[in-house]
Amino acid sequence: MNYFLAKSDPLTYSLADLEREGECIWDGVKNAQALQAIRLMQVGDCVLIYHSQGESAIVGWAKVSTGPRTDPKDEKSVVVDLAYAGKLAEPLTLPFIKQSGLFPDLLLVRNSRLSTMAIPKEFIAWLLKQRKEFRP
């Protein structure tokens, strides 16, 4: 299994929206580096859901339910379907991640504007220790 992180403004689309709907098309990504991450996603991969715009925290996770395909609304873009998988009892904030000092090279720390990114397994191992309810 591979791990990724996808950011969303919770006022536009939140983890609660994904939970209610059960599944969604993850679209609207334009950045070339973020699109490359989506192209690497495979069915069953875990995607951390991160709320941006104020909260700046990992709030839950989803599973990739379909592989990457061309966005029917934009042939230059790529989409996947995500299925709700769970939520964290307490959000894991970006300041907390930064204060740990353990992940200075994590794209979330280095390039916090990037909307979708691969996440290393070392970070996932740390997250499992921080949030016991996390079950990728």
Image (cartoon, rainbow, N blue to C red):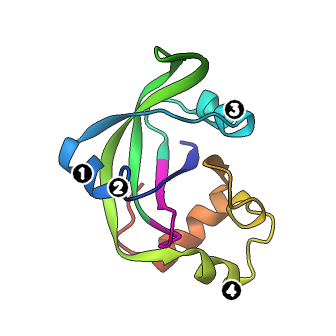
Q: Amino acid at mark 3?
A: Gln
Residue 98 placement: quadrant: bottom right
Q: Secondary structure at mark 1?
A: helix
Q: Give the CA separation, mark 3 to mark 2.
A: 23 Å
Disc 2 from disc 1: Cα separation: 9 Å
Residue drawn at the location 51% of the way across and 34% of the way down: 28
Point out residue 18 in the picture as x, y percentages from the top left corner: 29, 47
Q: Compare marks 1 and 3 and give the one earlier in the sequence.
A: 1
Tell me which corner region of the image, top left, top right, bottom left or bottom right, holds residue 33: top right
What residue is disc 4 on? 99
Q: Position of residue 66 (x, y in %)?
A: 41, 25
For mark 1, does the 10 Å Cα neighbourhood hold few (<14), some (14 to 19), or many (20 or more) residues? some
User: Which circle, 4 or 2, is nearer the viewer?
Assistant: 2
Q: Is residue 56 magenta?
A: yes
Spatial CA span between label 4 and label 1: 30 Å
User: Helix, strand or loop at disc 4?
Assistant: helix
For marks 3 and 2, give the one nearer the viewer: 2
Residue at mark 4 to residue at mark 2: CA–CA distance: 25 Å
Q: Earlier in the sequence, mark 4 or mark 3?
A: 3
Indicate left or right for 88 with 47 as reference: left
Q: Which residue is mark 2?
A: 14
Indicate the amino acid at tag 2. Ser
Q: Residue at x 63, y 31 (%)?
A: 40
Question: In this figure, which residue is indicated by the disc labeled 1?
Answer: 19
Q: Which residue is mark 3?
A: 36
- Which quadrant of the rendered structure holds the C terminus? bottom left
Question: Where in the figure is residue 24, as x and y percent of width and height?
Answer: 33, 35
Amino acid type, mark 1: Glu
